[in-house]
Image: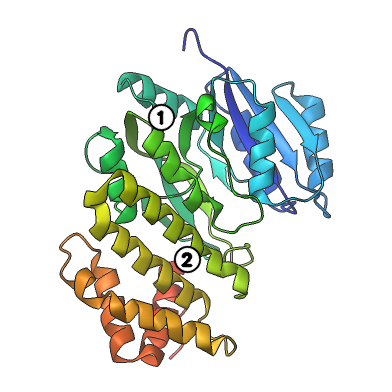
């Protein structure tokens, strides 16, 4: 590809020695030549630091930085601050990408004369099962459409990865330090800042579903950040697009139900669980009457209203089925 602009790939690294080399190999194999790979070690205590150093010594496209632990948001923000590219993409260090990941994103961006670009992704489970999350529809959408589809989880998601952004976006946008589910508080702002968003239908990013990841670990009160971040997002979206009030309610429902799923099997925090269930029940009528709300949401809200223990049992069964794990009788 002629006249390639420099594209920065920011990779936060924290205790991922089992997955890091695969991630780096996929980035070093990129068919788009003019890239810089910014590795930000966020105070790793395993061999991740050594892996970063070894790779940086053998390939000049890698720029390696080491800092005290500040969390994923802090590492991403640092990576952005030292990036030299006109465009930036984020890749999590336990994930990996196809060889044409960057080339594909840049091609659909230019082809559609867009401000930013998105590609589809695959979810890779420990069992070996792979679920492809592919886009169907227009290859170019506006900010309003992107946000509405994101709120309905309609093939457009809140993840920071699998996207290509103009670096200038992050002069006014940053990831919230010290919070979980930081993407929810950030990605929608890039949609608001974009005039046109190119959406590629091909899956080029491979997301590794890890049971031991921060998000999937045992429930803690920090995971209530999902509800907090979602509320901030929906409040700001409604200020810009008041007509998205109904899809914002659907997104709040998702945050409540996802938090309940995180609490599945936890005996503590009964008061918090009861309050979340009460909030779910308040959304029953608007969600069940919303034709665009996903069927799984409607099924979940009906089950929760009938019997939360029944819902919890069904969720555990569904999760095993989704991951391709054996389901015991």
Query: Residue 199, image x and y in percent?
Result: 33, 35
Q: How many marks?
A: 2
Q: Nearer the viewer, residue 2 or 170?
A: 170
Query: Residue 228, image x and y in percent?
Result: 50, 63
Q: Determine if residue 158 is in view.
A: yes
Residue at horizontal 69%, vertical 43%? 75
Task: Give the residue pinned by disc 2.
Answer: 227
Residue at horizontal 31%, vertical 37%? 143
Q: Nearer the viewer, residue 211 or 178?
A: 178
Q: Residues within 10 Å of mark 1 (few under 14, many from 20)?
A: many
Task: Give the residue pinned by disc 1.
Answer: 116
Q: Is residue 114 left or right of residue 182?
A: left
Mark 1 or 2: the one toward you: 2
Task: Give the image's coloring scheme.
Answer: rainbow
Q: Determine if residue 217 is in view.
A: no
Q: Residues within 10 Å of mark 2 (few under 14, many from 20)?
A: many
């Amino acid at each position: 590809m002629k006249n390639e602009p420099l594209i920065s790939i920011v990779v936060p690294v924290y205790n991922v020695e089992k997955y890091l080399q695969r991630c780096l190999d996929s980035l070093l194999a990129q068919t788009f030549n003019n890239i810089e790979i910014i590795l930000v070690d966020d105070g790793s205590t395993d061999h991740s630091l050594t892996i970063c150093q070894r790779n940086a010594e053998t390939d000049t496209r890698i720029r390696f930085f080491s800092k005290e632990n500040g969390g994923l948001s802090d590492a991403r923000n640092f990576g952005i601050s030292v990036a030299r590219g006109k465009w930036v993409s984020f890749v999590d260090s336990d994930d990996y990408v196809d060889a044409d990941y960057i080339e594909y994103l840049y091609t659909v961006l230019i082809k559609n004369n867009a401000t930013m670009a998105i590609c589809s992704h695959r979810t890779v489970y420990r069992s070996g099962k792979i679920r492809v999350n592919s886009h169907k529809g227009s290859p170019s959408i506006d900010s309003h459409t992107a946000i509405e589809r994101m709120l309905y989880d309609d093939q457009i998601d809140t993840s920071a990865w699998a996207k290509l952004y103009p670096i200038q976006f992050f002069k006014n946008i940053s990831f919230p330090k010290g919070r979980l589910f930081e993407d929810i508080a950030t990605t929608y702002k890039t949609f608001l800042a974009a005039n046109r968003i190119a959406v590629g239908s091909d899956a080029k990013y491979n997301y590794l579903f890890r049971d031991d990841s921060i998000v999937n670990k045992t429930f803690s009160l920090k995971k209530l950040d999902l509800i907090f971040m979602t509320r901030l997002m929906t409040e700001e979206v409604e200020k810009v697009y008041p007509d998205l009030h109904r899809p914002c309610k659907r997104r709040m429902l998702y945050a409540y139900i996802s938090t309940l799923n995180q609490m599945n099997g936890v005996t503590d925090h009964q008061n918090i669980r009861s309050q979340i269930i009460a909030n779910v029940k308040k959304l029953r009528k608007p969600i069940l009457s919303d034709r665009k709300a996903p069927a799984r949401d409607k099924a979940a809200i009906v089950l929760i209203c009938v019997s939360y223990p029944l819902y919890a049992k069904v969720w555990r069964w569904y999760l095993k089925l989704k991951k391709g794990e054996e389901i015991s009788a």
